Amino acid sequence: MSRKKILVTGGAGFIGGNFVQYMVKKYPAYDIYNLDFLTYAGDLTKHSEIEELENYYFLKADIADRDSIATLFKELKFDFVVHFAAESHVDRSITDPGIFVQTNVVGTQVLLDAAKQYGITKFVHVSTDEVYGDLEFDPTTFFTEVTPLQPNSPYSASKASSDLLVRAYHETFGLPMNITRCSNNYGPYHFPEKLIPLTISRVLNDQSVPVYGDGKNIRDWLHVLDHCSAIDLVMHEGVNGEVYNVGGHNERTNLEVVKAIIETLGKSEELIEYVTDRLGHDKRYAIDPTKLEQLGWNPTYTFETGIAQTIQWYIENKEWWEKIISGEYQTCFEKQYYK
Ligand code: NAD
Ligand code: TYD
C-alpha cells in the first residue's frame, strides 16, 4: 500500500502545529506536509523535535499564491488536505479586515481549485463556531450544525465565506469534504495574543491582565489535543459533505478563566484591569457536539485538567513565549490596549 500524503496548511501555527506533531507521531506511514507562509503567527521552532523525522516535510508558501499552490498539488499529489491556515485573531480583524479576506477567503478558494484540479481523497476545512454569530446568556441554547450562519466580526465573516466556498465546491464539483467548527481552543503553543496564553504569560510576569468590558462574555473552551483527535476522526470517518461541531461543554465567563489562572499561580486579583470592550463583542459561544460524539469522539480533558496542564506547560516553556512577546507583537499589543 502506498504511503498517504497529508497536506496540513498552517502547520506552524497553534492548532495546526499541534496537529502536525500529533499526526507525525501517530501515523508513521503517512507523510505529513506542513505548508505555512510563516506570518507573525507562524513559528517553526516548535517542531525542532520532529523536523528530522522521515515523515515530516515543511513547504513555505502563501495559500493565496495560485501558481505555487498548483505546482505543489501537481507535483506532490496529496491524498488529504487539512486546512488550518488563516488569519485567526478577532482583534486584528477589527483593525485590518483586508488580509482576512485575502488569506481566509481567497486562500481557501485557491486551495479548493487545486484540490479540484489535481484530485484528493478529502478536504477537511477547519472552521470556527464564530460563524454562527453569538448566543444569549441562556445556558440551554447551543450551536448545532444547522444553526444559521450569522457572523459578527470581519474574522468570522471571512471564515463563514470560506465555509460556503467549501460547501459550494462539494455541491457543484463533487469535491469530497468535511467542515469542522470548533469552540475556543487552548493548550501548548497558543500565541500569547489570545486570552488564555496572554493571561498566563502576563500573570507569570506580574503584569496586568486586560479584561474587555465587564468580563461576563462566555466562551466554550476546548483543549487543542481534543481538537486534534476530533479532526483525525473526521478525516478518516467523517461522512462526505458533512459539517461537525467540536466542543466539550466547558463554558466559562472570561472573568472565571482569568481568576482561575491567577489563583493557580498564587497571584493577586488586583492584576485584573478592566479595559474598553471589543467592538461587536460576541456574548456567548456554546457548542452542541452530539453529532461528533455519535461518530465516536470523546474529549479527554475537562477545563480543570486542561488549564492545569496548560499553565504547567507555560511555566516550563517560558523561553518559547518570551521570544514571541517581543518585537512586532509587543508593539501591536501596546497600540491596542494602552493607547
Ligand atoms: P494561528 O494564527 O495560530 O495560526 C495560523 C497559521 O496560518 C500560522 O502558522 C500562519 O503563519 C499561517 N498562515 C497565515 N496566513 C497564511 C497564508 N497566506 N499562507 C499560508 N499560511 C498562512 O491560528 P490557530 O489558532 O492555530 O487557528 C487555526 C485554524 O483554526 C484557523 O483556521 C482558525 O480560524 C481555526 N480556529 C481556531 C480557534 C482557536 O481557538 N484558536 C477556534 C476555532 C477555529
Ligand atoms: P480571544 O482569545 O481573542 O478569542 P475569541 O475572540 O476568538 O473568542 O478572546 C476570548 C475572549 O476573551 C473574548 O470574549 C475576548 C476576551 N479577551 C479579553 O477580555 N482580554 C483580552 O486581552 C483578550 C485577547 C480577549
Image: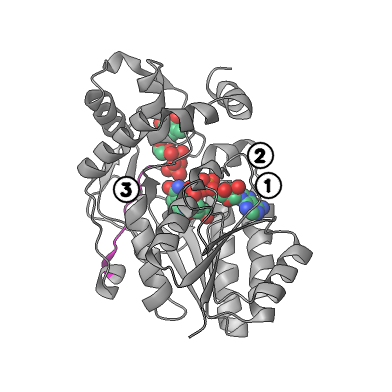
Image height check: is 27 above or below 225? below
Residue type (three-letter) at the residue carrying disc 1: Ile
Q: Earlier in the sequence, mark 3 or mark 1?
A: 1
260 relative position to 148: left or right: left
- Nearer to me, 6 or 123: 6
Position of residue 33 in the picture relative to residue 263 (left or right): right
Task: State the SS at label 1.
Answer: helix
* Labels 1 and 2 touching (C-beta < 8 A): yes
Dot 1: few (<14), some (14–19), or many (≥20) neighbours within 10 Å?
some
Which secondary structure type mostly characterizes the magenta part of the structure? Answer: loop
Determine which of the numbered discs, if any, sits on residue 96 in the image: 2
Secondary structure found at label 3:
strand
Give the CA distance from mark 2 to mark 3: 26 Å
Residue tagged by mark 3? Answer: 220
Question: How far apart in space, not on screen, are marks 1 and 2 (Cα)?
Answer: 7 Å
Q: Inspect the magenta stretch and tell me whether residue 289 lies in it.
A: yes
Q: Check disc 2: other Cα within 10 Å, few if <14, some if 14-19, many if 20+.
A: few
Amino acid type of the residue tagged 3 in the rendering? Asp
Q: Earlier in the sequence, mark 2 or mark 3?
A: 2
Give the camera-side residue of 295 and 243. Answer: 295
The amino acid sitting under disc 2 is Asp
Look at 26% across and 32% down and name the residue there: 256
